[in-house]
């Protein structure tokens, strides 16, 4: 939902205490309505210390914001960066299947705001080079100084969807969308936070619910802000997930096919090499070697081919995509190919007749 164009109601909302509680009732009734899921994803940048922090974490970086504009100077002369940050309601991560890689997710208590307490945050994966779970840092949230504590770090390529579009969380700081805060401690902050939450998203479970009519009815019932319901294709996000799953299946099938052909190709290639080296093997045997030594020599030769290919691909991948856990997966795949590619040549070597190798002429 989007807040309607200025009709005087927002000015009224920011001016009177009672208006806050009217909108609070509106939001609570939406959250408690059976048959729909009301959640909020608010992109709300915060200022954080910028020492050694890349400007890729700055809000607007992906849209071409230049490096100098990413940073500012705090009241104490310290450098700050206006970092990408997102406030989410309690079950957003669960809705999109996002789990923490280390630490924990948000708890119910984390959604209670008290300026004197630390604000619990979850960091996108690219932040783990700068902060660890349990670490504290200062920030400024909506012109309010806060102390943040890292409680969790997300895995790579974690995604949520907002208004039908996927957002990568790798460079985001996640804050709780505070649903409990003392209005009288900081009324202006409380009003801004609540108005942002009210412009949330609604997923209908009961297709009989007319969302436009419901929102309009509640706005009139509580004499609060008017909202425009922006309708997205209900199947859009699900279709994107389905496409991703289908693409993943196709990639897995392609990968398995490549691995099988690689194993067969290496096995056949080295079997031909074995046949061409009968005389050499015979010389080794006469020099005191055994069939196990020849088998080990062949394994080493296969390993050189496969590990050279792995090293080359790992270097190129790291240069393009950066260092990540996928390199370990590629290494594991290379080890599997090495093992399976060695089976047939080693079987043939160990079953050769020693006398035939020694007597065989070139």
Image (cartoon, rainbow, N blue to C red):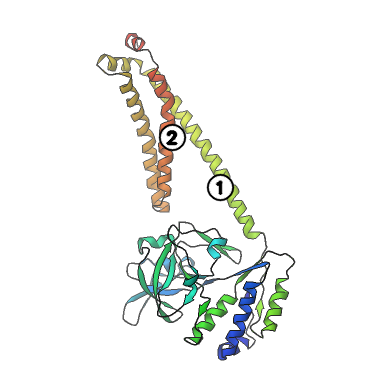
- For label 2, the SS is helix
Quarter of the image with the N terminus is bottom right
Q: Residues within 10 Å of mark 1 (few under 14, many from 20)?
A: few
Q: Position of residue 286 (x, y in %)?
A: 26, 13
Relative vertical location of residue 193 with respect to residue 242 in this rendering, above or below: below
At numbered mark 1, what does the secondary structure look like: helix, strand or loop? helix
- Horizontal and vertical percent for residue 143? 44, 82
Q: Is residue 238 left or right of residue 149?
A: right
Residue 237's quadrant in the figure? Answer: bottom right
Numbered circles on residues, count: 2
Front-lying residue, 341 or 266: 341
The structure residue drawn at horizontal position 39% and vertical position 23%, both measured from the top left corner, is 346
353 in relation to 70, above or below: above
Q: Is 270 left or right of 294, judged from the image as shown?
A: right
- Residue 345 appears at what percent x and percent y? 41, 23
Residue 173 lies in quadrant? bottom left
In the rendered view, does 182 fall on the left or right side of 205? left
Tag shown at residue 271: none
Checking the image for residue 337, the label placed there is 2
Residue sitting at 42 percent across and 63 percent down?
152
Residue lying furthest front = 109
What residue sits 35% from the left and 64% below the top? 130
**Which label was assigned to residue 248?**
1
Considering the image in quadrants, where does the C terminus appear? top left
Quote the CA–CA distance across marks 1 and 2: 21 Å
Q: Quadrant of residue 145?
A: bottom left
Residue at the spot 31% in from the left edge and 14% down from the top edge: 282
Image x and y of residue 48, in percent: 38, 73
């Amino acid at each position: 939902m989007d807040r309607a164009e200025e009709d005087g109601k927002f000015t009224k909302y920011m001016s009177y205490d009672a208006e806050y509680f009217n909108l609070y009732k509106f939001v609570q009734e939406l959250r408690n309505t059976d048959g729909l899921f009301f959640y909020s994803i608010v992109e709300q940048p915060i200022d954080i210390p910028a020492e050694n922090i890349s400007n890729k974490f700055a809000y607007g970086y992906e849209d071409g914001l230049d490096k100098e504009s990413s940073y500012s100077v705090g009241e104490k002369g310290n450098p700050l960066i206006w970092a990408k940050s997102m406030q989410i309601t309690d079950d957003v991560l669960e809705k999109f299947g996002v789990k923490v890689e280390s630490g924990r997710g948000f708890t119910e208590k984390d959604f209670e705001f008290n300026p004197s307490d630390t604000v619990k945050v979850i960091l996108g994966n690219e932040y783990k080079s700068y902060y660890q779970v349990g670490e504290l840092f200062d920030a400024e949230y909506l012109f309010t100084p806060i102390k943040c504590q890292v409680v969790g770090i997300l895995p790579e390529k974690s995604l949520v969807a907002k208004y039908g579009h996927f957002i990568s969380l790798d460079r985001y700081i996640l804050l709780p969308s505070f649903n409990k805060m003392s209005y009288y401690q900081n009324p202006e902050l409380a009003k801004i936070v609540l108005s942002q939450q009210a412009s949330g998203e609604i997923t209908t479970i009961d297709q009989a619910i007319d969302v436009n009519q419901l929102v309009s009815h509640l706005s009139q019932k509580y004499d609060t802000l008017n909202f425009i319901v922006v309708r997205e294709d209900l199947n859009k996000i699900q279709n994107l997930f389905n496409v991703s799953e289908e693409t993943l299946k196709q990639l897995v099938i392609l990968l398995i096919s490549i691995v099988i052909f690689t194993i067969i190709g290496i096995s056949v290639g080295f079997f031909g090499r074995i046949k061409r080296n009968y005389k050499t093997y015979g010389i080794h045997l006469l020099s005191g070697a055994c069939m196990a030594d020849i088998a080990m020599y062949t394994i080493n030769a296969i390993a050189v081919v496969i590990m050279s290919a792995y090293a080359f691909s790992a270097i190129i991948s790291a240069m393009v995509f950066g260092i990540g856990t996928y390199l370990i997966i590629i290494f594991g795949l290379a080890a599997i190919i090495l093992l399976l590619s060695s089976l047939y040549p080693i079987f043939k070597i160990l079953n050769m007749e020693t006398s035939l190798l020694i007597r065989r002429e070139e």
